[in-house]
């Protein structure tokens, strides 16, 4: 007979991470949503016991940051777990992500689970796409990062269980941690936050109804493949290229010492507008609603928020057939990651639709909004609750 999970009394979970990250980042946003769900009582049978974290100091030296990360904060987390155990105020410790695995103590009195978002840095690789070698994760990290990665590996091995979010990450978990209890729980997505209203607000000032506008969201990380996208765009017919504009949400500074995306676009005569890095959810939604499509040529994602959020907004998405967005897109919607002609044709098709509308607003694609129903918050909350139940009882 199946166990009645709903009959169990509420338990307490302590959330653990290192330095506070912006909620507009991938890891920061996932943590923010999880904590908010706990605080608001959305996760059945589980209550919020608190968070162990610290504010990142912008002026701290590299040495102080390392000492805080490797020694000060882990010591504090261990003491907090001991205190919660003595006070019977925590039944489970949930570590936010793989970059915080070093915080898992060698002997925890309370079961610890870690949510692994990706393994890019723990198991780096080099892939070749369109004749270009792309580093997924840092191939030759400096000595302090190598030491850091060893601590992370040891921490994951000390955990009682792992939670991951995609099939691609699940396969790596099974390969590298074959004896570790494993749960695959994709993120939850509140579609209502992205759904366009029947009467759209005015478009951002940088957009024009006289231009076919496309959206790009992402950093200069090589796996995002901004160079591939720009080179592909430069091959469009001249009459198409002169009537489009790309709007990039992300930093315009390349941390790898190379040209920024806007500079590279300028060299290839691709109309490119830099929106900025951290923008509000409200402004980002305006760009989703008022641009023709999201361009997402990334070669690898742990999950990939931009495509699913754009689909939730009813915005068409052109994404490469690579993990993990190829798990999340509708069947047959992804483009060959290396086929520049396929990308050009897909962009031309979007442009043709814009031309036919003759300046009228794009209608949201309701089939895409319906597609992301499988990422409902209710599903996420229920699956997380059941996983926490089992881990805390093991």
Image: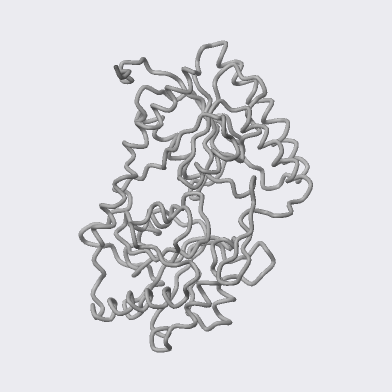
Q: In the rendering, at what x and y percent does residue 244 appear? A: 40, 79
Q: Residue at x 36, y 45 (%)?
A: 189
Q: In the rendering, at what x and y percent does residue 162 appear? A: 52, 33
Instruction: Decide: is 91 above or below 261.
Output: above
Q: Quadrant of residue 355?
A: bottom left
Q: Residue at x 33, y 74 (%)?
A: 350
- In-front residue for pair 359/343: 343
Check the image and tell me how it is coloured: one colour
Extreme residue in the bottom direction: 238
Q: How many marks?
A: 0
- In-front residue for pair 64/158: 158
Instruction: Decide: is 12 above or below 228.
Output: above
Q: In the rendering, at what x and y percent does residue 107 appear? A: 65, 19
- In-front residue for pair 323/1: 1
Instruction: Decide: is 35 above or below 143.
Output: above
- In-front residue for pair 58/168: 168
In this picture, residue 246 sits left or right of residue 137: left
Q: In which quarter of the image is residue 34?
A: top left
Instruction: Decide: is 175 above or below 299.
Output: above
The N terminus - image quarter? top left
Q: In the rendering, at what x and y percent does residue 168 appear? A: 49, 47
Q: Which residue is drawn at 57% across and 61% down?
A: 223
């Amino acid at each position: 007979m199946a166990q009645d999970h709903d009959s169990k009394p509420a338990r307490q979970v302590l959330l653990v991470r290192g330095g506070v990250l912006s909620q507009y980042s991938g890891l920061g946003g996932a943590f923010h949503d999880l904590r908010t769900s706990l605080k608001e009582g959305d996760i059945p049978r589980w209550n919020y016991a608190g968070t162990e974290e610290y504010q990142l100091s912008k002026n701290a030296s590299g040495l102080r940051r390392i000492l805080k990360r490797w020694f000060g904060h882990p010591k504090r987390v261990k003491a907090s777990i001991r205190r919660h155990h003595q006070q019977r105020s925590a039944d489970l410790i949930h570590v936010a992500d793989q970059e915080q695995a070093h915080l898992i103590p060698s002997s925890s009195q309370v079961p610890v689970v870690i949510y692994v978002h990706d393994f890019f840095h723990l198991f780096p690789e080099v892939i070749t796409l369109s004749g270009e070698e792309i580093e997924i994760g840092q191939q030759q990290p400096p000595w302090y990062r190598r030491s850091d990665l060893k601590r992370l590996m040891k921490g994951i091995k000390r955990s009682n269980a792992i939670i991951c979010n995609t099939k691609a990450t699940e396969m790596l978990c099974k390969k590298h941690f074959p004896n570790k209890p494993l749960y695959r729980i994709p993120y939850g997505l509140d579609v209502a936050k992205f759904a366009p209203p029947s009467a759209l607000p005015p478009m951002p000032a940088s957009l024009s109804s006289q231009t076919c506008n496309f959206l790009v969201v992402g950093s200069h990380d090589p796996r995002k493949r901004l160079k591939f996208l720009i080179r592909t765009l430069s091959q469009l017919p001249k009459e198409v290229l002169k009537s489009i504009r790309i709007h990039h949400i992300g930093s315009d500074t390349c941390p790898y010492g190379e040209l920024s995306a806007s500079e590279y676009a300028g060299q290839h005569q691709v109309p490119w507008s830099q929106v900025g890095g951290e923008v509000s959810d409200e402004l980002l939604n305006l760009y989703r609603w008022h641009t023709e499509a999201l361009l997402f040529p990334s070669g690898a994602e742990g999950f990939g928020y931009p495509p699913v959020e754009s689909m939730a907004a009813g915005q068409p998405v052109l994404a490469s057939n690579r993990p993990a967005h190829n798990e999340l897109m509708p069947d047959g919607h992804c483009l060959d990651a290396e086929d520049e002609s396929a990308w050009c044709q897909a962009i031309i098709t979007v442009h043709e639709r814009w031309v036919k509308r003759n300046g009228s607003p794009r209608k949201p694609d309701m089939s895409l909004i319906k597609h992301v129903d499988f990422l409902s918050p209710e599903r996420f909350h229920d699956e997380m609750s059941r996983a926490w139940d089992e881990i805390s009882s093991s």
